[in-house]
């Protein structure tokens, strides 16, 4: 996510959006990301953590896959797909603040959350380096396919490992084993 937004103007340019389309598109995508985060915040308890995580990965990954498939599409379609990605990835972003804190027992919570946060920062740094390299050497379609594949890995990992913790207290949530 960080890499995509850090290079949003370059990504939009690679998707053949020029001038106003690129500038206003970048603003619109950022606003949709904020809307997605606000929506996810209001849905987190009603929908549950696991479903919110899975749907966030599923639909944002589908948008990235379609962006790769329709990389040469009309600007409005590119913005619609990129905006869909921004809207749906908000759920996964909001869960970063809640879910890890619920999954680790109190005794190791700070260490577990700290390691998870550190790994996410390493991933962000690697992605920030690789996005422009991928755009230059592989092109926009392949870059979007790779991003969709990374999102698919998140979905699959969530499917097999993410428990539901919405109605549990911290002691109950942190004692869960991974489940379907």
Image: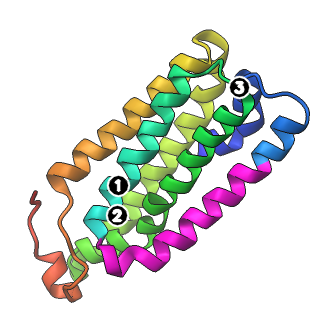
Q: Main secondary structure of the magenta part?
A: helix
Query: Which element carries disc 3, helix, strand or loop?
Result: loop
Q: Which mark is residue 103?
A: none
86, above or below 141, in the image: below
7, above or below 138, in the image: below
Residue 137 position, x and y percent, is 62, 10
The structure residue drawn at horizontal position 34% and vertical position 59%, both measured from the top left corner, is 53
Residue 115 horizontal side relative to residue 106, left or right: right
Q: Within 10 angstroms of label 1, few (less than 14), some, or many (20 or more) residues?
A: some
Query: Which element carries disc 1, helix, strand or loop?
Result: helix
Residue 70 position, x and y percent, is 57, 22
Residue 77 position, x and y percent, is 65, 33
The outermost residue toward the right is 19
Q: Mark 3 and mark 2 in contact? Answer it, CB < 8 Å.
A: no
User: Can residue 91 be found in the magenta stretch?
Assistant: no
Label 3 vs label 1: CA separation?
27 Å
Q: What range of the chain is rendered magenta?
A: 27-48
Residue 99 position, x and y percent, is 33, 70
Q: Mark 2 and mark 1 in contact? Answer it, CB < 8 Å.
A: yes
The mark lying in front, picked from 3 and 1, is 3
Q: Which residue is mark 1?
A: 55
Q: Which residue is mark 3?
A: 74
Q: Which mark is residue 52?
A: 2
Q: Nearer the viewer, residue 23 or 137?
A: 23
Q: Nearer the viewer, residue 101 or 26?
A: 26
């Amino acid at each position: 996510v960080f890499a995509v937004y850090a290079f949003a103007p370059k990504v939009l340019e690679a998707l053949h959006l020029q001038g106003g389309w690129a500038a206003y598109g970048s603003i619109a995508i950022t606003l949709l990301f904020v809307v997605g985060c606000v929506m996810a915040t209001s849905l987190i308890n009603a929908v549950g953590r696991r479903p919110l995580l899975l749907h966030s990965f599923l639909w944002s990954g589908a948008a990235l896959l379609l962006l790769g498939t329709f990389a040469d599409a009309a600007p409005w379609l590119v913005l619609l797909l990129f905006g869909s990605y921004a809207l749906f990835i908000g759920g996964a972003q909001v869960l970063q603040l809640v879910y890890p804190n619920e999954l680790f027992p109190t005794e190791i919570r700070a260490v577990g959350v700290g390691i998870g946060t550190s790994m996410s920062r390493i991933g962000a740094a690697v992605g920030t380096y690789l996005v422009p390299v991928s755009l230059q050497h592989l092109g926009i379609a392949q870059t979007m396919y790779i991003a969709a594949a990374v999102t698919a890995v998140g979905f699959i990992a969530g499917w097999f490992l993410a428990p539901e913790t919405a109605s549990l207290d911290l002691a109950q949530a942190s004692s869960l084993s991974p489940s379907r």
